Image (tube, rainbow, N blue to C red):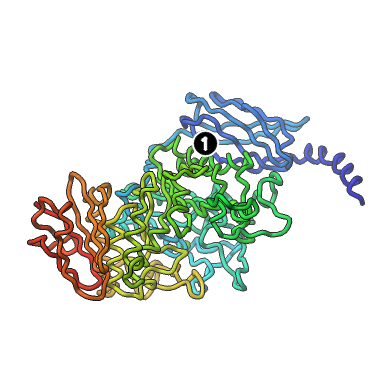
Amino acid sequence: MNNRILSILLFLLLPQLADAQAVIDRVNPTSWWVGMKNTSVQLLVHGTGAGTLTYSVNHPGVKLVKTNVVENINYAFLDLTISPGAKPGIVKLVGKRGTQTLTQDWELRARDNEPKGQGVSAADFIYLAMPDRFANGDPANDLFADLRDPYADRLNPFFRHGGDLAGVTSHIPYLNDLGVTAIWLTPVLENNQPLTNENGTMRASYHGYGFTDHYNVDRRFGGNEAYKTFVHEAHTAGLKVVQDAVYNHVGNSHWFIQDLPAKTWLHEWPSYTNTSYRYQPITDPHASELDRRITLDGWFVPFLPDLNQQNPYLANFLIQHAIWCVENFGIDAYRIDTYMYNDQTFMNRCNAALLAEYPRIHIFGESSVNNVVDQAYYTRNKIDFPFKSNQPGTLDFVLESAMLDALRQPVGWDTGVQRLYQTLAQDGVYQDPTKLVTFLDNHDHDRFLSVIGEDFDKYKLGLTWLLTTRGIPSMYYGTEVMLKNFKDPTDAEVRKDFPGGWAGDKKDKFKAADRTPRENEAFNFVRQLASYRRTHPVLQTGKLMQYLPENGLYVYFRYDASGTVMVASNTTDKPLTLTTKRFAERLDGFTHAKNVLTDEAVATLAAVQLPAKTAVVLELLK
Ligand SMILES: [Ca+2]
Ligand SMILES: [Ca+2]
């Protein structure tokens, strides 16, 4: 059959098929609220022939402004306005075609009192956990035979292990005790992806970065209700919640990938094209358009299709989903996955929409770069780039590598602790460097303890910097009980189960009695510094003054009207006595101090004893 005959046949048959079979099987967002600042919402309506129906809405305060159709007749996009006086309840969406009338219920809700969009700031300390690997609170949800990946196997590092939201919720008291004030979980939305073959190994989407339905939390994590419970319990305990957002791509089993609304929904290439993972073409004024397109529109991996955020219906879909999660679950901040590979104009629009509804919300993306200029591009900055990002913060990858270099490189003119000093010395490019989220490692990097050669002195030094310098500190789960490993042979090595998170684990490191003396020392060290930071605004909002490092000695101060804290670090292998005359500018008026880490009194400030590879944190007193 040639194409012309096929087209004529389809032309004759399709209307009848649509007439006979038109259905609505999905409306996204699944609900919305009365009283949002933006009174417009665009409903994606999906189902066989959904785009061939004529829609109407008869509900107090709700107006159907426009019905939009796209090239796939299974979609309609309905532009609604919801007046402040609209009545919460079930809205009937009526679709008609010929003699057929379809009625679809859609929920309009009143806003609830759960705190939402509270933001995270330098007053916070974020704990990053992977729910599949943290604790299994409900063994009944570990696997489901009707999902594309029906397995759970703790002996396989690449499979799901059964950890879930109930497991995180039940350890909120542990996190409170440790002194963290916010929890960032790797994504919890449904990833109904099959196992994928990655370099010859079958792997599960346990990490969560391949969404298949934006409006459902994965059943294996406990579903939407478990997430709501987790957020509510966290808030009740004084903890905020950071959600991991993924705008750049979805899983290739996502329901809308199975029935694409339009050719322009994705970045499609004549043949498969991966992103180069090179970020320079985005900021480079000399870049070729081809290099830019490959970086931005190339696919992250073959099973994560790259979304075209310039498609206006897709852009609305993603932005409304971001708002829906804040409003529905009560989340407080967003970490954004692969920030650099998104359309940056779209990102600005999305950030602005979130900030318009929730002025205090914090947003910080993953931009894995190796220099301050490229990092500044993705947050509010003072550089004259042609594109100006409105993102409030960003993850501070440059400071991470600088802190690690300070601990692993020999002291030199531009090496060792100079790297830390020199990185912070470039903070002038940011509008507000205190909004950057700092870290020593994460789920994609070698674990901190291994990078520094499992040296406990260096471990304490790094954590001291993390918890006393500028920024919003974050810590990867298990660092406090000295989990270690390189990504050798794969990242599964840095994503091990938290010991004690599963019934029957030999050791329960959530409990002091099951931790070794060294692990308790580590836990208590983190807790001590976190507690001091939490109760001393000077470490949150105080100014930072740093002195040029000399021979591996690095001294900085945090100070404001409420007090002054001096942090003196000896990054060398030898004990040293630090003469403090050079710091008179900040020591003026202070005569003695309290050692924050030991609570000991320090009688004189003339000289400070610094054993090899140690830092002292001194609260200066008059
Ligand atoms: Ca489970
Ligand atoms: Ca992209």
- Determine the secondary structure under disc 1: strand
Q: Which of 296 and 236 lies nearest the eye of the viewer? A: 296
Rendering coords of residue 238 (x, y %): 31, 48
Asked whether residue 9 is in view, the answer is: yes
Lateral position of residue 183 relative to residue 186, left or right: left
Residue drawn at point x = 34 percent, y = 55 percent: 424
**Residue pointed to by mark 1:** 32
Q: Which of 190 and 247 lies nearest the eye of the viewer? A: 247
Characterize the local packing of mark 1: few (<14), some (14-19) or many (20 or more) Cα atoms within 10 angstroms.
many
Lateral position of residue 611 relative to residue 168, left or right: left
Looking at the image, is 357 positioned above or below residue 385? above
Looking at the image, is 153 positioned above or below residue 90? below
Looking at the image, is 228 positioned above or below residue 444? above
Ligand 2 near label 1 (Cβ, under 8 Å)? no
Q: Which corner quadrant of the image does residue 119 belong to? A: top left
Residue drawn at point x = 53 percent, y = 68 percent: 159
Total labels drawn: 1
Lateral position of residue 103 relative to residue 443, left or right: right
Rendering coords of residue 562 (x, y %): 18, 46
Q: Which of 424 and 378 lies nearest the eye of the viewer? A: 424
> Which kind of residue does numbered mark 1 sit on?
Trp
Rendering coords of residue 506 (x, y %): 37, 75
Rendering coords of residue 360 (x, y %): 38, 40
